[in-house]
Amino acid sequence: MIVMSEDSQRVKDENAQEYNISAARAVAESVKSTLGPKGMDKMLVDSMGSVTITNDGVTILQEMDIDNPTAEMIIEVAETQEDEAGDGTTTAVAIAGELLKNAEDLIEQDIHPTAIIKGFHMAAEQAREEVDDIATVVDTEDEDLLRSVAETSMTGKGAELNKEHLSSLIVDAVRAVTVETDEGENVVDLEFLNIETQTGRSAGESDLLEGGIVDKDPVHDDMPTEATDADILLLNDPIEIEEADVDTEVSVTDPDQLQQFLDREEKQLREKVEHIVDLGADVVFCQKGIDDLAQHYLAKEGVLAVRRAKKSDLEFLQEVVDAAVVSDLESATADDLGFGDVTRDAADELFYVEGDDAHGVTLLLRGSTDHVVDELERGINDALDVVAQTVSDGRVLAGGGAIEVELASRLRDYADSVSGREQLAVEAFADSLELVPRVLAENAGLDSIDTLVDLRSAHDEGDVQAGLNAWTGDVENTADAGIVEPAHAKEQAVTSASEAANLVLKIDDIISAGDLSTDKGDDEAGGPGGAPGGGMGGGMGGMM
């Protein structure tokens, strides 16, 4: 006997499975329309009124107000896909939702969830092997291919008009931060790539700079704005009067005493500036404040100084100019200084900082408005990740649903060798993969059934790379058309989707201390009520 509180709720057996599958499918349905080059965008407005316009799967799911525990498990699929592969989040979530939909049909045929789980696991293992077999090993020095990978990732994310220019910047940026290990492997370290954004300009004016950017002004008008072959001090210590640690009161009986205090403060500031000059610094980037009097002294010495620089900028400049960030000015030595060139872009009010053989580069993205440049940045980040994966992994696949249709065909052949009820689960897995080309066709305004029939026909005739070109509506060799994706992203999507689906299917009992949501706010409407309808009303009210 289980003794539960009055507020607790319990959903068992078929009701629990139906509840979980409905919640997971609702998440998948919410992002399906964003898939592909002609996918639509979502406008997300948070409780503070901030607006996000995007078709990036993981961004949509993270911004949505979801408080259903099962739905949050599906969101983890997108987050894992983003972390591991950088792109393909919508694909992973959509496949997970379709797997659960097909699993529900099998459960209604009295097939036990354990058999379905085993079949899905077998199918996922086979699918990964087939992806490796289908994938094309490419020369990672092939810039045309890398640009195609970048363009495929960016398409549909607000960057189409300038995708050729942006893809070239992305490939150059990845090249700049790629190092070769002793074993001959390519390692891409995106930590040495900084992304800055600017509004008011076209995306076609985006640029790649060797070095870093500091979006600040000189602290004094009389300071120089440029320095060539400069010694650069990165400072995380204010150039200001040192405050006492405790509150003190001083009685002043004579104006001369007050003057002594002022003279002492002035001397303190002068000593700080003299120490900077003695170090040999020509440029100072300070994360903290700089006193007005110190600004005057620095200007007199011809030192360029910037205050309130971002911590992230200083950390990036460490790599660019090979300097140390100094936390205590008095203990700074000449060895802490970096070396490089500092130039001023008066039009954009930026400092460009370049170092000798700098490993760090900055991608300066421009867009007409904040919303445009934010979505552009999300698309660029995904493209950077997939190009980096391609350089590291060296395997690509034809896009446009080609790999999904081929995998589905091979999994159906594999299912013939599987005995028992697991065979039906493997076939259901194959059917689930074909969701991708169907949705690509739907989002492009095409007939999904006709498209899928044409794709199957092409693959039956041996064209492994036949996919849908959403721009023309034709079934063609998408690899030749420049629509290519990294193999690792597809492997990760299949793995994440199958494991999430299996996790949901294995649950047959939901016991909650209160309502079946993770948000214990005032809104108590809905609740599971022993059936999925109520749970979707309350558990995902902020989403639907």
Image (spheres, grey):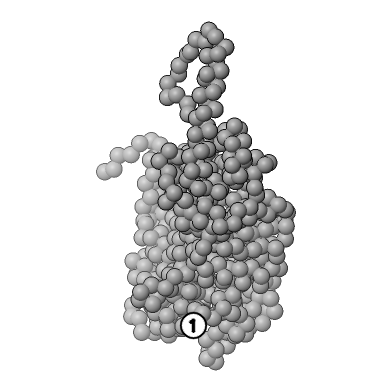
Q: In the image, what residue type sits under mark 1?
A: Val
Is residue 221 left or right of 240 when viewed as pictured? Answer: right
Q: Nearer the viewer, residue 426 or 250?
A: 250
Q: Where 354 falls versus 111 (above or below)?
A: above
Is residue 377 left or right of 9 when viewed as pictured? Answer: right
Residue 508, horizontal then vertical, whole percent: 36, 56
Residue at the farthest bottom position: 461
Number of numbered discs visible in the structure rendering:
1
Q: Nearer the viewer, residue 308 or 510?
A: 308
Q: Where 372 falls versus 169 (above or below)?
A: above
Q: Residue at x 54, y 81 (%)?
A: 142
Q: Residue at x 64, y 68 (%)?
A: 166
Q: Is the residue marked by circle 1 packed among few (<14), some (14-19), or many (20+) residues within 10 Å?
A: some
Residue 236, horizontal then vertical, whole percent: 48, 42
Q: Which residue is mark 1?
A: 138
Residue 183, horizontal then vertical, whole percent: 35, 76
Residue at the farthest top position: 253
Quarter containing the N terminus: top left
Q: Residue at x 55, y 89 (%)?
A: 463
Residue 212, horizontal then vertical, whole percent: 56, 56
Q: Is residue 440 visible?
A: no
User: Tag 1, which secondary structure?
Assistant: loop
Q: Is residue 206 visible?
A: yes
Residue 476 appears in which quarter of the rendering? bottom right
